[in-house]
Amino acid sequence: MPDLGAELGRIRLKNPIVCASSEFTMTLQGIRAALAAGAGAVIAKSINESPQAARQLEAAEYAMLDADGAVTPWESAHLDASLFCRSGLAGTPLTEWLAMLAAADREARARDAYVAGSITVSDAAPAARIAAAMEAAGLRWIELNLSAPHGREAAPGAVRQLSDADLVHEYVSRVRAATTLPLAVKLTAQTGDPLVLAECAVAAGADMLVLMGRFPAFVPDIETMRPVLGSAGAIGGRWSLPLTLYWVSKCFKAFGAATPLLATNGVRSGDDVIRALLSGARAVETATAVLMRGPAAIEEMLSGIEAYSARKGIARLSEIVGRAADAAMSYGAIAPVERAGYPWDRFIRGA
């Protein structure tokens, strides 16, 4: 069997599959199911100090969209379908929530895995206090989510999406000062240059980066002429994986081995995991595939990367991290190419 281990600084995963924060990881049963399926880690549903963020979950709604942008039944949705949703944060009281996560992480230890706490920010000071409480409860890993795609639409004080470099530095610095635990920072691509945000997060003490959060979206239903879900929402899908991997590859080239990267938004299969690793990620976070197909999605991904490793003769999966990113050329370095016949040629030539 190939070694599927992933080194994330002070965290070593038995494999690169991380079940991302979502409604699936909002209960002990869901977390246990992801661990039993073989996930290297589970990121619990996010929490913060805001009652508005918890109330937002009460109005949550979810839809799968097919390739034509139409709502499709969950049970028949293809891997290429997109998740469009309106969501919120866990509303369990903090003390009770952390006790549950600590118990889940103790169970994870027996499986050589992790359960990490997640904080989707509203204000910096409460986020720091929650991080300190997570460490005091016995957790071993924290994800700080600065990428909330619902930030623009949420009620005031619920959640924020940080696209300002100074704010990223401030929030990460405050949380870093409050905890000694490994800190993953999840960033958005909704900014002029996500590399600047990445640099600020690392400078402020992020141990690893999670790239990139989902996108705010608006989807009209052409039959009813009204918005799907009745509002704007957040969207992600397999189509977004190349966008994710663009920034993963750029951060890999910028930071090298010093800053572990996790890819999220678009990972649906074992092959997608391989694409992420080749781009420079050491692990992936997946949510929609698990929401669609349950923990079997994790098992399928693991089978896929094991089969790929066997087929390519790979002894350690970590050996391929960044291989495609390292081979990528700048446009200016590419020699002139002899173009084959493209479909539009026949129109240009009048054929």
Image (cartoon, rainbow, N blue to C red):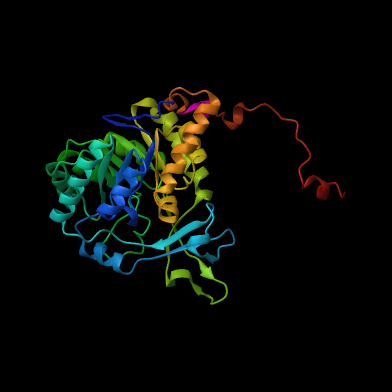
Q: Is the magenta stretch mostly helix, strand or loop?
A: helix
Residue 208 to residue 55: above or below:
above
Instruction: Based on the picture, tell me whether residue 282 belongs to the magenta stretch.
Output: no
Magenta region: which residues? Answer: 322-327
Where is residue 258, by image quadrant? top left
Q: Which residue is drawn at 40% across and 38% down?
A: 195
Q: Residue at x 20, y 36 (%)?
A: 181
Q: Position of residue 112 (x, y in %)?
A: 28, 34
Q: Position of residue 48 (x, y in %)?
A: 22, 55
Which quarter of the figure is the N terminus placed in? Answer: top left
For the image, the number of numbered tags is 0
Q: Position of residue 150 (x, y in %)?
A: 36, 59
Residue 115 shows in the view? yes
Residue 166 shows in the view? no
* Horizontal side of residue 302 vs 160, given as left or right: right
Where is residue 19, by image quadrant? top left
* Horizontal side of residue 313 vs 215, given as left or right: right
Q: Position of residue 200 (x, y in %)?
A: 31, 38
Between 191 and 267, the one lying in front of the other is 267
Instruction: Based on the picture, tell me whether residue 324 belongs to the magenta stretch.
Output: yes
